[in-house]
Image (cartoon, helix red, strand yellow):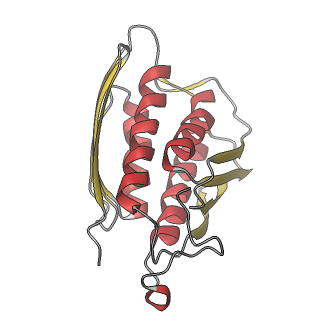
Amino acid sequence: MNDRRATVDRETAETKIHVSLNVDGFGRAEVQTGIGFYDHMLTAFARHGRFDIDVRCEGDLHIDAHHTMEDTALALGAAFDRALGDRTGITRMGDALVPLDEALVQAVVDISGRPFAVTSFDWVGERIGEAPTEMVAHVLQSFATAARLTLHVRQLAGANDHHIAEATMKALGRALDAATRLDERIAGQVPSTKETLTT
């Protein structure tokens, strides 16, 4: 198996971020963003995707949560982009349908090299802890952009924002785990009729 690991350090006037990633991990997560619920979301993503991640962010939380959540998603997406390299031998597409009590969320991923995200949520309130609910969709879009993948996420049911957001991250983790798995039948091949998923 290829060593599918990557480290990304990203620093701006708004955030200072370190991300390390092992795609072929065990679901271990060390996450410190200063936003408790966001830490919970990223931990759920790693646990259910079987990714090992170390995420640390020092952000301008005295302003709000936006830059921390957006930039962390960009750095994590960039880590996936680097770790997957030329995408040789990957399954490429994956999907997951995840319930959490009354909530039900579907995530579908295509590691296509084409950054695109479509999301559909029906939030009840404006915040979950210190995390604005509107940022969930923005996190997904930022991640898809930096990881260079196509992502569709749909809330099919749900009345509790915590459950909806958590089910979303679990579904994303499971769908991405399926899409990044190596298929021995196409070892050494890029799963595309274009024969590239990076340009």
**Residue at figure coordinates x 43%, y 88% from the top left:** 184
Closer-to-camera residue (9/44): 9
Q: Is residue 72 visible?
A: yes
Left or right of 102: which side holds 91? left
Q: Is residue 102 visible?
A: no
- The single residue placed furthest to the top in the displayed view is 62
Closer-to-camera residue (108/37): 108
Left or right of 43: which side holds 98? right
Closer-to-camera residue (184/104): 184
**Residue at figure coordinates x 61%, y 73% from the top left:** 192
**Residue at figure coordinates x 54%, y 50% from the top left:** 148
Residue 129's place in the image compared with 83, above or below, is above
Q: Position of residue 159 (x, y in %)?
A: 69, 42
Quarter-of-image position of residue 132: top right
Quarter-of-image position of residue 39: top left
Quarter-of-image position of residue 47: bottom left
